Amino acid sequence: MSNRNFFQPKPFSIHSHALAGQNERKINMPSYKDEKTGTWYVKLYYTDYTGTRRQKMKRGFALQREAKDWERQFLEQQQGSPDMSFSAMCELFLEDKKAHAKLSSYKSEKGRLEAWVIPYFKDKPLSGITAADIRKWQAELKTATGANGRPLSQSYLHNIVMECSAVFNFAVKYYGLLRNPCRIAGDNIGKKVKSVQFWTHEEFNRFIATFDKSDPFYTAFLVLYYTGMRIGELMALTFADVNLKEGTIRINKTYHKIDGKTVITPPKTEKGNRTITIPRFLCKCLEQHMKRLYGATPEMRIFHSSKDPYLQHMKKHEAMAGLRHIRLHDLRHSHASLLIELGFSALLVSERLGHENVSTTLDIYSHLFPSKQSEVADRLDSLYSSNNY
């Protein structure tokens, strides 16, 4: 049985019911106006795909039209038809994404869909969106500008196109849509461009020399550069994660600030859970830093600052050192570059950075690995000569 047939919802039924109360007046079923607040609401009963009778109520609409639009979209979602509006499918898609993805990833994807995709296709039936429609949308995206007034980057455009395609893939898999028009249209914006900027070892030494050694940011930037961990992973480190005797750091979580609240989640990938060995000088530096922290407990974070101070200190001190600007995340790339320069394999770099697989490492850093073609030819020549063919 195909996924499309398996996930096709059962038929549902619906009827509306007016709320009793002297402040409430039925205007046009099932939309109602609350005379007390002056807003509109919808109340309806329906039987879902499991055969369970349920009630749904939604308040706070400024206009009756908005209440009816919400009602129509809700019914489309319950019916589970590929003829539902694009915005209705996006709501289902994001609901699923929220249940299965990290909150930070969900919010990023939701923001891009709401800003660049949903407004364009909004009320258009999902099954009525063609490859030609996708190409027209992509053409408009190419001319779009962000909040800074500049054109959207190639990488950001690529993410938008991929997220739009993900909505259609979701509809194909679970709601009976026959095909994904994005696959037919192709990506006419451009492939994702990975930005890999980094400092050389000499450049990093100039940068770190501008700090006082008692400055907590001195230790933090040393850890970022000599371990390659992500800033969120650094900010989540606790005393229990550092074993100075063994010279190791355990990375098993990452720090986020979402809607003003601190959120600790697992690393970006499963391979992100890792234990890395650190050099002796870094152990000594961490030991001195940790001794300066009062009332330490195993669960206490080692670095207390939020992300913004790291960005500010990086800009300030790179200017003091006369260095070109790189992003905070590029210290991770700088560590990878250092390992490659020291002759370590792509597999070791992958394990240390916590990439899901070595292909990710090669995709990002392949141009940094020295070419061994001449060495291969020389060794094959020696092998041939030694056998006297």
Image (cartoon, helix red, strand yellow):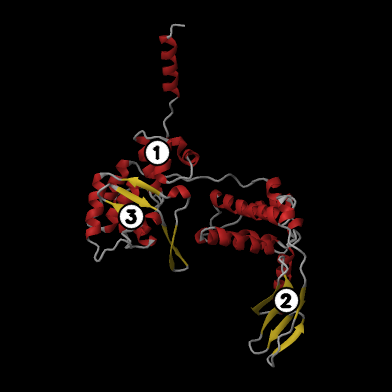
User: Is residue 5 placed above or below 48 in the rendered structure?
Assistant: above
Which label belongs to residue 200? none
Q: Residue 300 falls in which quadrant of the image?
A: bottom left
Indicate the position of residue 82 as horizontal and vertical percent values: 74, 58
Camera-near label (1 vs 3) is: 3
Q: Residue 126 falls in which quadrant of the image?
A: bottom right
Q: Residue furthest front?
A: 51
Which label belongs to residue 348? 1
Residue type beneath disc 3: Asp
Q: Evaluate if marks 2 and 1 touch, with contact meaning CB atoms under 8 Å apart.
A: no
- Which element is circle 1 on? helix
Q: Nearer the viewer, residue 192 or 149?
A: 192
- Horizontal arrangement in the rendering, residue 119 relative to residue 296 (left or right): right
- Which element is circle 3 on? helix
Judging by the rendered image, the residue that carries numbered circle 2 is 45
Q: Residue at x 68, y 49 (%)?
A: 182
Q: Residue 170 falls in which quadrant of the image?
A: bottom right
Indicate the position of residue 246 as horizontal and vertical percent values: 27, 47
Residue type beneath disc 1: Leu
Q: Residues within 10 Å of mark 3 (few under 14, many from 20)?
A: some
Indicate the position of residue 85 as horizontal and vertical percent values: 72, 63
Judging by the rendered image, the residue that carries numbered circle 3 is 241
Please report whichever mark, 1 or 3, sits nearer to the chain's N-terminal start.
3
